[in-house]
Image (cartoon, helix red, strand yellow):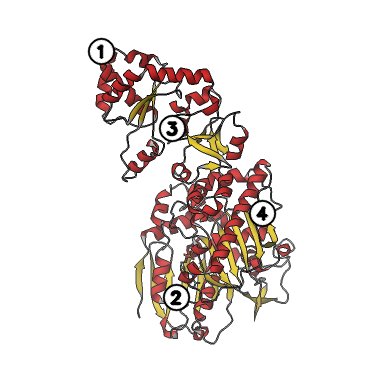
Amino acid sequence: MSNKQTLSFQAEVAQLLHLVTHSLYSNQEIFLRELISNASDACDKLRFEALNNNALYEDAPNLEVRVSFDQAAKTLTITDNGIGMTAQEAIDHLGTIAKSGTKDFMGKLSGDQKADAQLIGQFGVGFYSGFIVADKITVESRRAGVPAEEGVRWTSGGTGDFEVEAITRAERGTSIILHLRDDAEEYLNAWKLKSVIAKYSDHISLPILMEKEEWKDGELINPADESGGRQPGGMAKTGEWETINKASALWTRPKKDISEEQYQEFYKAISHDHEAPLTWAHNRVEGNTEYTQLLYIPAKAPFDLWNRDKKAGVKLYVKRVFIMDDAEALMPTYLRFVKGVIDSADLPLNVSRELLQESRDVRAIREGSTKRVLSMLEDLAKHDKHEAAAAGVDGVTDVVDADDQAKEGKYSAFYAEFGSVLKEGLGEDFGNRERLAKLLRFASTTSDTASVSFADYKARMKDGQEAIYYITADTLAAAKNSPQLEVFKKKGIEVLLMTDRVDEWALNYLNEFDGTPLQSVAKGAVDLGSLQDEAEKKAAEEAAEAFKPLLAKLKEALKDKAEDVRVTTRLVDSPACLVVQDDGMSTQLARMLKQAGQQAPESKPVLEVNAEHALVKKLEGSVHFHDLAHILFDQALLAEGGLPADPAAYVKRVNALLV
Ligand code: ADP
């Protein structure tokens, strides 16, 4: 590429840029965090590539970031000597967004600036945040290892397009030159820059350098000025550079030297989340496998939580050298919301993704980190409800979790955001199934909010109750009003109401809790065991006997719709309900699969009738027997949120009887 080229941004980038410039004013200064974080990533990448090609360091082995400004030109420049970009990389990386789910995310934006600013915080704007403070950005870059003539200059005003041209650049790496807007001129001040960098980027392991300044003689001193009593502009550059950050990776420092705010800022820097995390744990694990883990649980779900292909949020370092982002081998999929850093002392520096999958050390790290996350959650749950403490983690010394935080209310906040994802663990992580089951919460016939644990339920079980009863439905209202609950309500037995899409699937993997079987009230014949007294049992048996001829007739009339017809004791007010065979798929799950366009096995439900109900009693000898039988069946279907196979025929039958 020789001469200038003008190119258009990908549509999503243009949209994002518009938003960035219109809705992120309230938190202007984050642009510095984002750009320094990119600079640091670029240095990490160089260090990693140089493991196999030392020549990439050229003659500048010390990786660093330099921040400088020019008051006359109104520019602020962030320069790194990291991996750099080729012209094509600049076009690709700064003109398009590669994140999966970007389109969906853009679709969710409402145009309401406040709401969108919230969302965008979860998306992470990265490089484009420069346009919060700049009306023009120039990027000059040269990739490590390519000739000086193959540099690139990228320029954009942050609207529809950008320009690229070839330049000669002796130094490897990237300079981001921000042409500041009038309302962002406060960043042309060393004091201001240092304070923002201290706040957001102190944990960056690279040195961040700024040019030393000296007082010019005879300048006015104004005590009211925030820069310490001196007027800005009264300083002269000295040509000498000094390191202005601690330049040691946060997780390598002892806990006592890290403030709560620093932990939170580090989280925001690695996650691009604008909200503080719910909790975190920082441990050095010793033993067969040695590593440091700093793991965070976010307060809010990211925009793409439901994408199971979403990359995990844990970064892998080996002996402080960054190896890779999104190391999925380090966390199970159901904990994909966890963010943080794992720094291993044992893995080889040249570890690849493939190798990660097979490494025993990685397996140990993954198990240890999973347990650590679960114990963080147990801790939150304990403080939320003041329950007894749950199990600890083996092999962990120097446990540093965010003990001092107020944890009350945090578990319910966590559960509202991530509870559904956690449930996936029942099917994914057999080894931790019991611990996971303890962390689950549901609504029930005594609580409309998802706050009942299996342990709570068990503590409230009736004398003689032998199972944990639950029902699955599409909505809470449908669950609560389900005819299948009638006898349980009458007898005051609590039933868990499961209305989450994953419940049905997840519960396939959980047959019991702490020795008590789980029983769906919509599956199989109802067996209340010793909750039913002898008189009730006898009455039920007699009814079944007396109804035999009627049942046979019903079965014949409904043979295309129902697998079987039987008398039940589970109903009190309703004439009939549908249940599935013990081993069958629930009608709710089957319906969900069909809605999702998937093949659901065709299995017919069982119709259960209430022998005490007037409508059922009326069946015997009725001239409308056939129509009544079908109405009974279709109504049972309607009651659980389904639709009759032939709605028009149903309406016709009901109308005929009404007339
Ligand atoms: P993200 O950092 O989340 O990938 P950004 O929009 O911040 O998104 O950056 C997009 C891409 O541009 C980066 O992934 C990287 O490839 C490239 N990039 C940005 N800043 C630099 C830099 N200072 N040096 C090299 N590449 C960079």
At 62% from the left edge and 60% from the top edge, which residue is drawn?
265
Q: Is residue 98 visible?
A: yes
For the residues labelled 3 and 4, the Cα–Cα distance comes to 38 Å
Q: Earlier in the sequence, mark 2 or mark 1?
A: 2
For the residue labelled by badge 2, is the local secondary structure a helix, a strand or a loop?
A: loop
For the residue labelled by badge 1, is the local secondary structure a helix, a strand or a loop?
A: loop
Front in this rendered view, residue 579 or 481: 579
Front in this rendered view, residue 596 or 185: 596
For the residues labelled 2 and 1, the Cα–Cα distance comes to 84 Å
Residue, disc 1: 623
Say above or below: 501 vs 28: above
Quarter of the image where the C terminus is located: top left
Residue 153: assigned label: none
For the residues labelled 3 and 2, the Cα–Cα distance comes to 61 Å
Mark 3: amino acid: Ala
Residue, disc 3: 522
Q: Residues within 10 Å of mark 4 (few under 14, many from 20)?
A: some
Q: Earlier in the sequence, mark 3 or mark 4?
A: 4
Residue, disc 2: 85
For the residue labelled by badge 3, is the local secondary structure a helix, a strand or a loop?
A: loop
Quarter of the image where the N terminus is located: bottom left
Mark 1: amino acid: Val
For the residues labelled 1 and 4, the Cα–Cα distance comes to 69 Å
